Amino acid sequence: MATFELYRRSTIGMCLTETLDQMVSSGTLSPELAIQVLIQFDKSMTEALESEVKTKVSIKGHLHTYRFCDNVWTFILQNAQLKSEEGQETVDCFKIVACDSKLLTQ
């Protein structure tokens, strides 16, 4: 099964990875089980975003960088304005990582 490591660079993903590394180093957890936990984390995050997130946001900003590698688009915007029903927010830097969700289920 192909899986994308989209959420592992988020704060929660990095904390999970660090904790699993410590557990493997101390012998509390096998490396195989740690890998399975990370794969399940990716699946759970994908499912939660598909089923729980209902808010639509429009994003405008200056495109600083874009790239396409391994069927994944990455966009970095500067001075981005995010607008939703709840209001508007401006941020200095905003990163978007996008892939074809059909590839996640293969």
Image (cartoon, grey):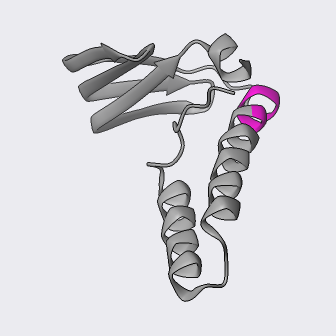
Give the quarter of the image for residue 44: top right
How many numbered discs?
0
Picture layout, residue 27 above or below residue 104:
below
**Position of residue 103 measured from the top left corner of the image (x, y, whole percent):** 63, 15
Q: Which residues are magenta?
A: 47-52
Give the quarter of the image for residue 37: bottom right
Picture layout, residue 25 above or below residue 85:
below
**Extreme bottom residue here?**
26
Pick whichever, 40 or 79, lies toward us: 40
Residue at left 54%, top 43%? Answer: 7
**Extreme left residue here?**
64
Residue at left 25%, top 16%? Answer: 66
Picture layout, residue 4 above or below residue 32:
above
Is 48 contained in the magenta span?
A: yes
**Position of residue 49 measured from the top left corner of the image (x, y, whole percent):** 71, 33
Picture layout, residue 20 above or below residue 26:
above
Side (left or right) of 97 relative to 44: left
